[in-house]
Amino acid sequence: MRRQVLLAGLETRDCRATGAAEGDESALFEALVDHLRPAWNGGRVRLLLSAFAPSTPDRPGPRVWNSQLIRYAGYRQPDGSVVGDPETADLTAAAQRLGWRGRGTDYDVLPLVVQQPECEPRYFDLPPDAVPEVQISHPDHPWFEQLGLRWHAFPTISNQILELGGLRYTLAPFSAWYTCTEIGARNLSDTNRYDKLPEVARGMGLDTGRDRTLWRDRALLELTVAVLHSYDQAGVSIVDHHFATKQFVRHEEREYKSGRSCPADWSAIVPATSGSATPVWQRRCEPTRELPNFSPHQAPWPTGGAEG
């Protein structure tokens, strides 16, 4: 039985008894799908965390190999290029070694690779209704849709260990909503990700032959505008970076007034665009780690992700 509790806006699901039997990866997968559906909530994305069985002294907890429950595949090509998301190329190769075969497009949804303690991993394809996506268009540039850009509606982080009450929950996925810069100024823009700024700049008629024209900056802004517009048009929860940083400052002030510190990672709270135009730019955060907290899993495959 799974219990649901609402704590300060975060809904938590008690899944500690789910998939307790050795080799019961199917039950874990179904519970993960059951996390995605209510988190989606028809576009009004919920803050939701599902906690599965923690590690014990004689038995590690379950895990999934995916960094997020919904991610796009990245297929390494013989010439070194990647079709899809280069960030997931290692996971894609690992899933292929397990027998998974994608379509080879830029936006193939990866399967979930689920692993029980001391068992071999298994992969499961997500059902379409658990993977809502948003097609990216621009409010002023009709040609933008021809780029064929899209992104999944919300993030669900799944490769973090939750350290809480002296326990380590190795599978504790949590969902939230995106900030527009995460998609427009990072996922679709970074040169080691989808690297779409040159295409956007060409569509805008910008001179990409010289950095001095600031074509990257202008394309980055318009791509972020397109993301925010598209999510709003689709009725999907998303926040802009100005709202998000003001919200953090209000949280920080409340903590200080209550006599508590407010540790943060400066690189995580300052947005990828217009950082100096936000109220967090002048803040200086000490590298402090406190508990409860999340820590990343070690990747289950060798670094390099060579095909096997």
Image (spheres, rainbow, N blue to C red):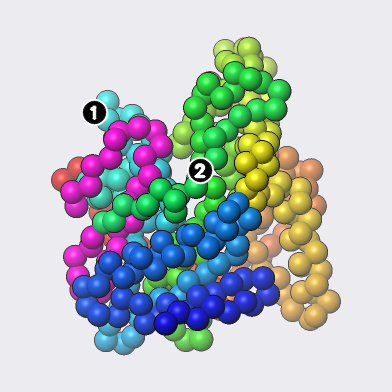
Prevailing SS of the magenta stretch: loop
Which quadrant of the view contains residue 255?
bottom right
Residue 209 in the image: above or below residue 89: above
Q: Secondary structure at mark 1?
A: loop
Q: Is residue 205 visible?
A: yes
User: In the picture provided, is 49 more to the left or to the right than 229?
Assistant: left
Tell me what residue is drawn at x 72 percent, y 54 percent.
Answer: 244
Categorize mark 2 by other alpha carbons within 10 Å: few (<14), some (14-19), many (20+): some
Location of residue 8 in the rendering, given as x and y in whole percent from the top left corner? 68, 75
Residue ID for mark 2: 133
Q: Is residue 190 visible?
A: no
User: For this rendering, which residue is in front, 200 or 103?
Assistant: 103
Please provide the residue range marked out in magenta.
Answer: 98-122
Which quadrant of the view contains residue 269?
bottom right
Q: How far separated are the C-alphas under marks 2 and 1?
A: 30 Å
Residue ID for mark 1: 78
